[in-house]
Image (spheres, grey):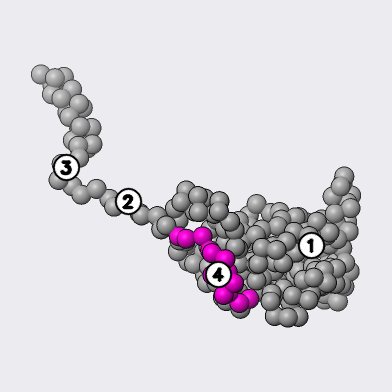
């Protein structure tokens, strides 16, 4: 009898634990927002200042884990008819910097160009020119970030394949950081940040110098060319 009783307890216990009450309400499912992709008229009415404010607000949402729910399938279909992004963002290759996410933007909102060290060359310039002059974006944002591996490699004078040539685009920022008063090595996070921010400034100068087209647009107030620095530990974007 004891064996039978023990067996009943063993078979009944998991059943009782897993039984769902028939009248218990199901948890509500989140409803994706069916956001509209920006239209040509809406893009035309934007100013560079409005775009900066939108990116700042989007980053605040990201930091606070208050991201917009989006119906990506609907947005993909809507965007197939044309694109009218707000901004061109030149970012580092780093996988820890998900550009659309950190600004809480969706399909069709921004152009993103990525290269290790967020520097500018002929190909990047041509892409930015397309984004602004042809496609109507109102802002160029050069986005560097904390603990950048490309910046560290430039500081360390790494010699490796095509990386060696790539780092020549970042080394001017290392040289311009000679006034730093602390230890100038890639192990000093403060120095790495100092070089990274100088690299952002250098990239902005290069864009203005080597693209008369973009410089003219900025002089006319049609676009702004600015920089920002992304903090990996907090998710916050600091606009420079």
Cα separation between marks 4 and 3: 53 Å
Cα separation between marks 1 and 3: 62 Å
Residue that badge 3 annotates? 21
Number of other residues with Cα within 10 Å of mark 3, as a class: few under 14, some 14 to 19, many 20 or more: few
Q: Which mark is nearer the camera, 1 or 4? A: 4
Q: Earlier in the sequence, mark 1 or mark 3?
A: 3
Q: Position of residue 199 (x, y in %)?
A: 79, 67
Q: Which image quadrant is residue 209 in?
A: bottom right
Q: Position of residue 68 (x, y in %)?
A: 45, 61
**Label 4 secondary element:** helix
Cα separation between marks 4 and 2: 34 Å
Q: Which mark is residue 43?
A: none
Q: Are marks 2 and 3 in contact (CB under 8 Å)?
A: no
Q: Is residue 165 magenta?
A: no
Q: Are marks 1 and 2 in contact (CB under 8 Å)?
A: no
Left/right of residue 63 with respect to residue 139 in the rendered view: left
Q: Which image quadrant is residue 31 in?
A: bottom left
- Given residues 171 and 40, the one toward you in this image is 40
């Amino acid at each position: 009898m004891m064996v039978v009783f023990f067996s009943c307890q063993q078979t009944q216990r998991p059943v009782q634990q897993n039984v769902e009450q028939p009248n218990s309400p199901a948890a509500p499912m989140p409803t994706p927002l069916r956001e509209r992709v920006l239209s040509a008229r809406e893009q035309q009415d934007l100013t560079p200042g409005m775009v900066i404010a939108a990116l700042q607000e989007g980053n605040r949402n990201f930091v606070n884990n208050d991201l917009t729910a989006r119906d990506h399938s609907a947005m993909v279909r809507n965007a197939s008819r044309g694109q009218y992004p707000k901004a061109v963002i030149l970012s580092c290759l780093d996988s820890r910097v998900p550009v659309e996410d950190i600004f809480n933007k969706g399909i069709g909102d921004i152009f993103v160009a990525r290269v290790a060290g967020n520097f500018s060359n002929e190909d990047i310039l041509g892409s930015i020119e397309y984004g602004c002059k042809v496609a109507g974006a109102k802002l160029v944002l050069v986005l560097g970030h904390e603990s950048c591996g490309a910046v560290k490699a430039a500081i360390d004078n790494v010699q490796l394949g095509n990386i060696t040539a790539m780092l020549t685009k970042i080394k001017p920022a290392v040289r311009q950081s000679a006034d730093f008063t602390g230890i100038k090595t890639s192990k000093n996070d403060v120095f790495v940040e100092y070089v990274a921010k100088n690299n952002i400034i250098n990239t902005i100068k290069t864009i203005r110098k080597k693209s008369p087209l973009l410089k003219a647009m900025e002089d006319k107030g049609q676009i702004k060319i600015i920089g920002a620095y992304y903090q990996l530990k907090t998710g916050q974007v600091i606009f420079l």
